[in-house]
Amino acid sequence: MSNESDTTRGGAERGLIDQIRGAVEASDAPQLTALLEPLHPADIADVLEQIRPQERNDLLALWGGEIDGEVLSELDESLREEVIGQLEPEVLAGAVRDLDTDDVVDILEDLEEPAQELILDALEADDRAAVEQSMAYPEYSAGRLMQREVVTAPLHWTVGEAIDFLREDDGLPDQFYHVILVDPRMRPQGYVTLGRMLSARRSARLTDLAEDSFRTVEGEMPEADVAYLFKQYHLISLPVVDAGGRLVGAITIDDALNVLDEEHEEDMLRMAGVGEESSISDGVGETLKQRLPWLGINLLTANVSALVISLFDGTIAAIVALAALMPIVASMGGIAGTQSLTVAVRALATRDLTSSNAGRVVWRELRVGVISGLVFAVCMGVMAWAFYGRDIWLGVVIGSAMIINLAVAALAGVVVPLVLNRMKLDPALASGTFVMTLTDVIGFFTFLGLATVVLL
C-alpha cells in the first residue's frame, strides 16, 4: 500500500465508507481504488467488516485483484475465510507471497483444509516448507507464533561485518529488532540490539555488545506463556529453539501483543457467555449457536432461584413488601460478586493472583464485602422503614440480608475462580454462572428466611 493515510477511526469514517459504498454501487473501479489505496491494511479490513455482505462481494469483485496480504492478516477470523474464498488463486498467491511466515500461519490456522491448500500452493517451495514446519507445532504454541525469518551472526563477527551483511542481504524480514548471535551448531548465545550495534565502532566485537539478559523458548511453549514473558520482562523479541537448542525462529513484540489482546478479549466474551470467537461480523445463525447454550444454562440456574423463593410463598403472601424488596438484595449481591469476579479473573490471567497471595486477596475481598454490606444495609434499612409502614424490624431484616449477601458475593467472586483454576478449568468460562447463582440463592434465602423468623 502506498501513501498510507494517517486518518484514524473518527468522525470522517462514516463519510469515507459512504463514498466507498457509492463507488461500489456505481461499479466505479478507479474511484474505489483511489479511495482504498491510501488506507492502512487494518483500515481496509475495518471497511470490509462494516459493509453489508453483498456490498463486500461487489467490492471484492471490483478491487479484489489488488488486495494486499496484510489486509487478509488484519481481517476478523470469522470473515477471513469468506474473503479468501472469493479471490482468484493467482490473486491470493500474489497477496500472501510477500507476508512473513508468522502472518501466513496466522491466516492458515483459522481456515479449513481446502483453503489452506489453496494458500500453500501459492507459496514458493522454501516458503511453503517453512510454513508447514510452523504448522507442525501445536496450536496456540510459540512455534505457530514465531516468524522463521531471523537475522543471525557468528560469534566472531565485528560490528562492521554485521552491518555490511545487513546492507547486502535482500532477504531480511520486514521487522527485526536484534541480531541473534549463534554458534556453529545454530544455537543462540545472545543478541545485540540494532541501536547498540549502530552506535558502536566497526571494529567492536558483537559478543562485547550482547545484552546481559538473554532468554529463549522452545517451540512447544503455549503462546499465553510466551506473551507473559514479553510482559514480565519487557522484551522486544524472543528467539525460539527446538528440542536440541537450535534456533528455528523468533517472536516479535507485535505478535505477543496480539496474543495478550486476544486473551483479554476471550476472557471478556467468556465471562459474558457469548463464546470466545463471537464477532460483530457473525451471522444470526452463528450468533445464536454461541449464545443459546449459555442462555439455557442461565434458565436452569434461574429456576433454582425460583425454587428457593417458592419455599417462602406463605411469608411473601403475608408481607407483600417482601416481593418488592427481595430483587434489591439479589441485585446488589450480583453486582458485588461481578466486581470481585472481574478483578480475580483478570488477575489470574495476568498471573498477579497466585497461591502465594490468594489468602490475602480473599481476606481483603471479604472485608470489602462486609463493609459495603454495612453501608448499604443502613441505607436500605432506613428506606424500608420510611416507605413500608415504618416497621423497624423490616429494616433490620433487609439490612442483615444485605450484609450477608454482599459478603458472600465478594468472597465467592474470588474463591470460585481460584477453585476452578486449581481444577484446571477456565475461570472466565464458568465462574460467572456459579457466582450469580450463588448470590441469588443466598440473597433470596437469607432475606426471606430472616423475614420468616423475625416478622411472622
Image (tube, grey):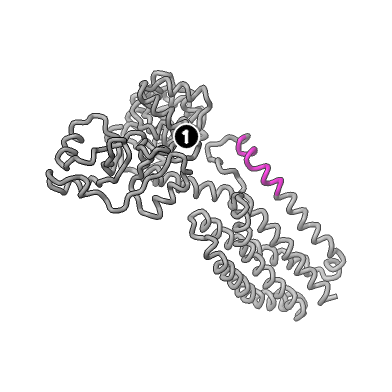
Residue 391 is situated, as x and y percent measured from the top left of the image, at 77, 79
Residue appearing at x 71%, y 48% in the figure = 297
Mark 1 Cα-neighbour bin, 10 Å: few <14, some 14–19, many ≥20: some
Residue receiving disc 1: 137
Residue appearing at x 40%, y 53% in the figure = 231
Query: Camera-side residue: 235 or 413?
Result: 235
Q: Is residue 46 visible?
A: no
Quarter of the rendering occupied by the N terminus: top left
Query: Camera-side residue: 310 or 200?
Result: 200
Q: In which image quadrant can residue 126 be found? A: top left
Q: Is residue 210 visible?
A: yes
Image: magenta residue range: 286-297
Q: In which image quadrant can residue 96 be found? A: top left
Residue 41 is situated, as x and y percent measured from the top left of the image, at 37, 35
Quarter of the rendering occupied by the C terminus: bottom right
Q: In which image quadrant can residue 250 be found? A: top left
Q: Amino acid at mark 1?
A: Tyr
In this rendering, position of residue 45 left or right of residue 390: left
Main SS of the magenta segment? helix
Secondary structure under tag 1 reads loop
Residue appearing at x 12%, y 47% in the figure = 201
Residue 43 is situated, as x and y percent measured from the top left of the image, at 39, 38
